[in-house]
Image: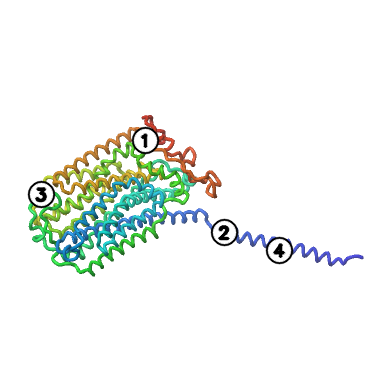
Amino acid sequence: MEKDPSCYQDAAKMVAGDGLGAEGMEAQLDDFVGAHPDYNEEEEEQKYFRRKRLGVIKNVLAASLAGMLTYGVYLGLLEMQLILHYDETYREVKYSNIQLEDIDRKVLMGINVTPVVALLYTPVLIRFFGTKWAMFLAVGIYALFVSSNYWERYYTLVPSAVAIGVAIVPLWASMGNYITRMAQKYYEYVNYKEEHVQEQQRAPRGACNTYIIIFQTVFYACFHLSFVCAQMPMLFFLNNYLYQLNHTLFGVKHCGTLSHGTLPGFNKTVLQSLPRSVNLIIVESALMAAAFLAMLVVLVLCGSAYRPTEEIDLRSIGWGNIFQLPFKHMRDYRLRYLFPLFIYSGFEVLFICTGFSLNYGVCALGLEKLAYLLMAYGFSASACSSLALCMLRLRRQIPLLAGALVHAALLVTLFCWAPEPRHLVQAPLLYTIAVLWGTGSALNKTSISILLGMLYEDKERQDFVFTIYHWWQALAIFTVYLWSGLPMKAKLSIMLLTLVVAMVAYCCMERKVAQHVAYRLPRIPRPRHKMRGYRYLEEDDSDETGSEGDDGKDDNDEHPAESTSGDKLPKDDRDQLG
């Protein structure tokens, strides 16, 4: 039986139709998943890294704002609290049976003594929580200190003061580490096409220095404004209740270099009327709101300092090693030569807030002018922090030596000058000294942080180095707390001697670095976690310390932990130090 030829024709048409349908589907699929004709990969990549760079700038500004608010609230509340509690009438009327003066002494002891042991726990705290969350925790403790002043009792004020002492070094060590890391990340996002960036290897020596200088300058310009913010409770609240200088300074006989202790003869009653409790609650609530805002800024606006894989590697070297490494880093001669500079940095900031402002400023102009003196210092320090930008063109020693020279001249001036009590004609000279001291402080603090970022570029070491810096600074502040009863001439002599030793030691350090003298860095152990999981599928994708190959070797191999020989530096170290 023969089939109809039309059946074969229909079957052929169906096969041809199926082939055309498949080709049409493939064409539609190519149109759907294929590259868009207007898509420019390079332009999109540029936009992506531009957003990343803007994110880094946002992080720096947010951390700077949080640091300014936190320290401003702390200083402002402590200043208002000490002035109120100093007044005999205020103590007797409001807190007659709780020995407020003794509580204040213990509060100051808690704030100044506790940081002495901070070197034991700060690196562990930062590695355990991470840099951002260590900042958040410390800012939260400062907010806790503010909240304790709503109910002023021994069991609220003293524990919160001890908590502040615990948080001081972790806060500023994590802040310094955070700003330096942001500079390094900004360099990576600017040079994203470089091979060492794409392969997550170490940047060339000194490559990030420009961004370290700029970001640390921005941070300290904002931070020094905290001394201005701290005076807002005095300006808008407490000054309305203070006696004039003829009453408060009636028993004061000597000022300045002739004085002993903290303003002897100062009147025990400084408030002409007592502030209402509701007004105090309003001021404390405003300070609490500012502290809470600082917490929110860190929480919401500050991004992470490290990638998650880097955070894992940083804490996987072992907690015993993390505890020991700050002590081992002190064997590096570069840090040892900087110890006197760290100590002087702590001396000078507390001296301007206590010794100069009280024994010179308040003694001559009255307590009502204290806020204006410290505001002059804060505005000057904030503006003059920008002078550190000269390190972009000049040698890095110049700003630090210039700040030291300014402070040395002022210390000699203060040593030879005793202002007359209740003599307002001396106000211009006192404000000039406050402004110049702010200039020296700005150059000092900004240059030290920049210098540490330049000398220690390894992300595995920066938290240890900044912990050592702020720990020595805390020891210096503790020393100033102990010497409060000394004659002013003794205080000024100690500060001047420390400054001279610091500058000589710093110049020796720079000289040895220029001569390529080998320095000792402890070996950073490799992470101990097992090499499992998606992040270790390919060896080249690992962020593990020392996994970058020969070009990314860290100082673990260049400077063994127990090496004591004076061998020449490896070639890449000579390039860095030269």
Looking at the rendered structure, the kind of residue marked 4 is Gly
Identify residue for label 3: 418
Tell which circle, 4 or 1, labels the residue nearer the N-terminal end.
Answer: 4
For mark 2, does the 10 Å Cα neighbourhood hold few (<14), some (14 to 19), or many (20 or more) residues? few
| Cβ–Cβ under 8 Å for marks 3 and 4 | no
Instruction: Locate residue 306 relative to residue 225 in the image: left or right.
Output: right
Residue at mark 3 to residue at mark 4: CA–CA distance: 100 Å
Residue at mark 2 to residue at mark 3: CA–CA distance: 79 Å
Q: Is residue 176 visible?
A: yes
**Disc number placed over residue 21 in the picture, else none:** 4
Give how far across and how far down residue 258 sits, in percent.
10, 48
Q: Nearer the viewer, mark 4 or mark 1?
A: 1
| Cβ–Cβ under 8 Å for marks 2 and 3 | no
| Cβ–Cβ under 8 Å for marks 4 and 2 | no
Q: Please determine whether, in this image, residue 528 is positioned above or below residue 79.
A: above
Q: Which of marks 2 and 3 is in front?
A: 3
Looking at the rendered structure, the kind of residue marked 1 is Arg
Q: Please determine whether, in this image, residue 10 is positioned above or below residue 541.
A: below
Identify residue for label 2: 37
Instruction: Locate residue 565 relative to residue 280 in the image: left or right.
Output: right
Q: Please determine whether, in this image, residue 426 is positioned above or below residue 526.
A: below
SS at mark 4 in the image: helix
Tell which circle, 3 or 4, labels the residue nearer the N-terminal end.
Answer: 4
